[in-house]
């Protein structure tokens, strides 16, 4: 008998429903598995990309997933984020909020930034007027005490760059905490800008060969073709008093171009994490009238007095 005359049996409704349920469950499990795998792959790629400027958007995407309440601030389509890697030290600094600067003071935008380590674990936050520019030197646990230190510049006034050839800035090292931060080094540096010169800059470098990085303020000069920098010329060298301690000046210029804050107690200055670092620097190290605009000799260190923490 031909197959067209064979009796066909309808599939039971329960079997159809069971098939749909099984198929839907498979799709759901696959979706969940992909979501978890995608997030893990993204974070792994982001961690391995720390220190690569070209992968800032990849790192920002991972941070937004890890910290949805501290998402990376985006300006003109670009995340305001910097990442650093120096040996086994480094991390990521990103802006989470930024004030819109006035037309008269374009450099004075106050920013709130987060700092994370190489594994993208959050280590603290900092309020700076220069947060848009990023932290100039790699963050890290440079003294081996378990806390993170960041080195940055601060603007003493809202109009630091009116004179394009000579001005002064604060250079500061901040130890990050959960609810409070600490100033562990502070210097006011007069910035004279001869032709083809870059600096001052801050770097972390082992100057004594003991395996512990010093905080070094340097300057460098461009070559004639403006393509290469000469080796760094050291302006000041600061060394750790102890883990969790302060950075003490070992070498400072004798021409009055640098003022150094020295804590009278030998301990860091603690302040609330939500306080603007620029204000703290002005409180700890007021500079004499004319410093940064005149080339007259100045004392190389400030009086050893500071407000009570």
Image (cartoon, helix red, strand yellow):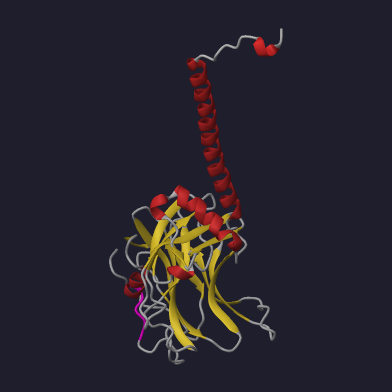
Name the image quarter holding the N terminus: top right
Q: Nearer the viewer, residue 266 or 64?
A: 64
Question: Start and end of the magenta stretch?
Answer: 284-288
Whether residue 287 is in magenta: the answer is: yes
List the single residue furthest toward the right. Answer: 1
Expressed as whole percent of the image width and height from the top left, the position of residue 298 reads 43, 87
Q: Does the magenta stretch include residue 66?
A: no
Main SS of residues in magenta: loop
Quadrant in which residue 234 is drawn: bottom right
Q: Residue at x 34, y 70 (%)?
A: 280
- Please give left or right for residue 127 compared with residue 12 in the image: left
The residue shown at (48%, 88%) is 164
Q: Residue furthest left?
A: 308
Residue 182's image quarter?
bottom left
Locate the C terminus by quadrant. bottom left
Question: How many marks are shown on the rendered structure?
Answer: 0
Where does residue 206 sit, x and y in percent of width and height? 60, 64
Q: Which of 233 and 17 is in front in this view?
A: 17
Q: Where is residue 127 in the image (x, y as percent from the top left)?
A: 37, 65
| Residue lying at 46% horizontally and 57% vertically, measured from the top left | 115
Residue 144 horizontal/vertical position (percent): 51, 53
Answer yes or no: is residue 300 visible: no
Instruction: Evaluate whether residue 251 shows in this view.
Output: yes
Residue shown at the point (39%, 68%) measured from the top left? 128
């Amino acid at each position: 008998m031909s197959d067209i005359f064979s009796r066909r049996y309808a599939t039971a409704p329960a079997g159809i429903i069971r098939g749909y349920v099984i198929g839907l469950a498979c799709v759901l499990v696959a979706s969940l598995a992909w979501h978890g795998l995608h997030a893990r792959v993204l974070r792994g790629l982001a961690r391995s990309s720390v220190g690569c400027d070209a992968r800032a958007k990849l790192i920002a995407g991972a941070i937004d997933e890890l910290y949805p309440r501290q998402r990376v601030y985006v300006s003109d389509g670009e995340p305001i984020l910097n990442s650093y890697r120096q040996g086994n030290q480094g991390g990521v600094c990103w802006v989470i909020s930024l004030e819109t600067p006035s037309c008269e003071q374009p450099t004075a935008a106050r920013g709130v930034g987060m700092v994370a380590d190489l594994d993208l674990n959050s280590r603290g936050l900092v309020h700076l007027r220069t947060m848009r520019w990023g932290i100039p030197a790699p963050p890290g646990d440079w003294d081996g005490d378990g806390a993170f230190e960041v080195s940055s510049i601060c603007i003493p006034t809202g109009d630091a760059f009116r004179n394009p050839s000579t001005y002064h800035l604060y250079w500061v090292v901040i130890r990050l905490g959960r609810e409070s931060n600490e100033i562990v080094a502070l210097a006011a540096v007069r910035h004279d800008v001869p032709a083809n010169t870059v600096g001052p800059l801050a770097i972390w470098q082992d100057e004594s060969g003991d395996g512990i990085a010093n905080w070094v303020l340097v300057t460098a000069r461009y070559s004639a073709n403006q393509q290469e920098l000469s080796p760094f010329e050291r302006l000041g060298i600061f060394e750790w008093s102890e883990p969790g301690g302060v950075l003490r000046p070992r070498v400072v210029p004798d021409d009055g171009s640098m003022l150094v804050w020295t804590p009278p107690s030998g301990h860091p200055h603690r302040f609330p994490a939500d306080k603007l670092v620029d204000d703290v620097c002005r409180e700890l190290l007021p500079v004499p009238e004319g410093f940064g605009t005149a080339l007259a000799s100045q004392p190389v260190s400030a009086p050893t007095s500071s407000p009570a923490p």
